[in-house]
Image (tube, grey):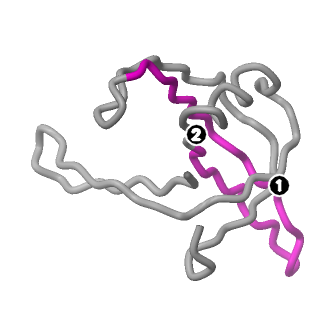
Amino acid sequence: MKDENRVLISGKINSDLKITKYKDKESGKETIFVGFQLESEKKQITKREQPNNYVWVNAYGEQAEFCRDYLSKGRQILVEGTLESEGWRDAKKIQHYKWFVK
């Protein structure tokens, strides 16, 4: 992992784990994907309370197996990964973006 795009984030798993099996295009082996939403806690920086932040976390292969076996909704964790995004257009041709840690 390159140091230019390293993310550390901690929080509580806020969603059920989305577990999907798929066939890896390069190796042809069956592997798994796990995705879940992480909620970072509110911070009282000023007199106003800051809103919670929600970030999706995506894991593949061995890391996904670890997530499947040991993580669940409500668990407090620390995640290290890279920040990535994906974009898409909906039926109304509106562009949407989703940020996640891989």
Report the magenta residues as a range.
Answer: 29-57
- Left or right: 95 with respect to 62? left
Q: Percent position (x, y) of residue 73?
A: 77, 26
Residue that appears at 59% across and 67% down: 1
Indicate whether 13 appears above or below 68.
below
Secondary structure at badge 2 equals strand
Q: Nearer the viewer, residue 74 or 44?
A: 74
Residue that appears at 64% across and 33% down: 62
Residue that appears at 67% across and 67% down: 7
Disc 2 to disc 1, how far (Cα)? 22 Å
Q: Percent position (x, y) of residue 69?
A: 77, 19
In reply to whether residue 5 is colored magenta, the answer given is no
User: Label 1: which residue?
Assistant: 41
Q: Tell me, for residue 91, which label it has, or none.
A: none
- Left or right: 13 with respect to 90? right
Q: Percent position (x, y) of residue 83?
A: 53, 64
Indicate whether 71 appears above or below 56.
above
Q: Percent position (x, y) of residue 25?
A: 29, 33
In this view, the mark in front (2 or 1):
2
Q: Farthest front residue?
A: 27
In reply to whether residue 56 is colored magenta, the answer given is yes
Q: Quadrant of residue 66?
A: top right
Residue that appears at 33% across and 24% down: 28
Q: Tell me, for residue 59, which label it has, or none.
A: 2
Indicate whether 47 appears above or below 75.
below
